[in-house]
Image: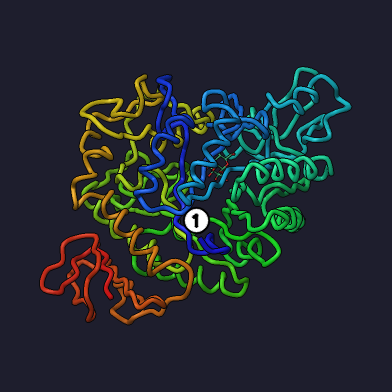
Amino acid sequence: MSQTWWRGAAIYQVYLRSFADGNGDGAGDLAGLRSRLPYLKELGIDAIWLNPWYPSPMADGGYDVADYRDIEPVFGTLGEAERFIEEAHELDIKVIIDVVPNHSSTESEWFKEALENPAARDRFWFADEPLNDWQSIFGGSAWSQVPDGQWYLHLFAPEQPDLNWANPEVHQEFEDVLRFWFERGVDGVRIDSAALLIKSDTAYEDLDEVHDVYRRWREVADEYGERVLIGEVWLPDQERFARYLRPDELHTAFNFDFLSCAWDPRDLRRSIDLTLSTHTPVGAPPTWVLSNHDVTRPVTRYGRADSTFAHGGRLHGTPSDLELGYRRARAAALLAMALPGSVYVYQGEELGLPEVEDLPNEVRQDPMYARSGGENPGRDGCRIPLPWSGEEPPFGFGTGTPWLPQPEGWRKLTAEAQRTDLGSMLNLYRSGLAIRRERLGDGTLTWLPLGEEVLAFTRDSGLTSVTNLGADPVPLPAGEVVLASGPIEDGLLPSDTTAWLV
Ligand code: TEU
């Protein structure tokens, strides 16, 4: 793979706890992931990004990190993680891990020390009174009190105390953590909540000094040859977003503007154009993301009358035409794969899994659910353990009872059931990724004027991608169809379908 593999890579997101369970305790783990590496190789991805795998009390699915230099025992051991990295590399698959610098865990050594010794509190945001009226992103106040009466800041759950990036020790610690993992062969890091690190008394989002942190991280990454820094940056302003991608900062960042779009030709076209025009000046490749462990699954989203995504209430329980959503999710997958830059596939997306909206409340684990007083269902519905095979739960996930229940109806969606079905979502992803590897990825596009409701463009390799978002079939341009997300008759591309032509 080239030195700049990340510019056009297809990156598969593994939510370890729900991927595959190797030891029968109902939670996914490294043993399960290692046993499924051949599946990922066959799928045709270039890299794996794993959500946090560190020791954690799991107050927020591992985003409450107790020790940045070890592996959560439920997932395995540090030795197994090292073997996993080696095995992935043998298959020519890169490994990206998640680093969580905005906050730590109340179970971290630093926080425990701070609790015992008020003189050791400067690594966090402690104060005698809350310094402002900030609300936690998961609901409720962002300040909690410790037994001796002081308060500490947590933008997320109370179990996730925010780190104080005004303290040089915090900078040193994270540079060491990056080195620790780069030395173990990790090819890149995904940076959690990357725009939130620096705080003033009145603001925490996108403060200018945060860029100094990433300039320094870039120097560290560059010391190890090509290692990639990927930002999780949710910012409405795309110009501000692109500042994170200047040549001496992060390599890429998740394109949430595209993800949040409705299934609407104007909205998508606006987002694609804006993405390209803001990335070009900084020389960074765009990324195309349809889903992740925080957002409603596309099959469900695209089947709703309002198909946008926003964190608030998640439109949970609003009617969704899943058949329509499935067709659109297929068309969206080929659209995302055809656009210039890198593409992300969140586990289960390649199986066409819908959001599970009818989980019994007592099994919900996402702190968003409890902290919003049940108003926000949270993110458990997109984190259901994967269905691999068989006719009933646990569908080959492992031998134990999965940590979240799987719907009975998923028997049709197992990887095994889809493997031999040429028309399945899984085979669409496989074929798409295979063609993408040869002809798509990094580069530029040229729009073709096929009407307002059609997104059509040609890539440098000569491949043309056409997505019809209108109600009526449209004639395809000249060329041979090499892949399509749905049936094509008499050269007409039906509604909600993407075709690739050469
Ligand atoms: O999410 C950060 C974030 O900014 C939130 O918008 C998040 O998307 C969440 O869904 C709230 O709506 C990251 C992680 O992706 C998320 O899983 C973690 O819970 C969060 O950071 C805290 O570490």
Where in the figure is residue 77, as x and y percent of width and height?
57, 27
Where in the figure is residue 63, as x and y percent of width and height?
59, 35
Q: Residue furthest front?
A: 90
Classify the position of the C terminus by image quarter: bottom left
Please rate how many residues cluster around mark 1, counting C-alpha atoms within 10 Å: few if below 14, some from 14 to 19, many from 20.
Answer: many
Q: Using residue 399 as the reference point, say whether residue 241 is left or right of it.
A: right
The relative height of residue 87 versus residue 462 in the rendered view (above or below) is above
Regarding residue 380, the answer to whether it shows in the image is no
Q: Number of marks in the image?
A: 1
How was this image coloured? rainbow
Regarding residue 443, the answer to whether it shows in the image is yes
The relative height of residue 131 versus residue 399 in the rendered view (above or below) is below
Q: Using residue 351 as the reference point, say whether residue 165 is left or right of it.
A: right
Where in the figure is residue 178, as x and y percent of width and height?
69, 45
Q: For mark 1, what is the residue?
A: 256
Residue at 21%, 39% (x, y): give it. Answer: 417
Where in the figure is residue 194, as x and y percent of width and height?
64, 50
The quadrant holding residue 214 is: bottom right
Q: Quadrant of ligand 1?
A: top right
The quadrant holding residue 136 is: top right
Residue at 34%, 68% (x, y): give it. Answer: 265
Q: Amino acid at mark 1?
A: Phe
Ligand 1 closer than 8 Å to the CB at disc 1? no
Compare residues 49 and 139 and report the one nearer the observer.
49
Q: Residue furthest left?
A: 490
Helix, strand or loop for disc 1: helix
Q: Using residue 276 as the reference point, say whether residue 501 is left or right of it.
A: left
Compare residues 101 and 128 and report the one nearer the observer.
101
Residue at 66%, 64% (x, y): give it. Answer: 243
Residue at 74%, 57% (x, y): give it. Answer: 219
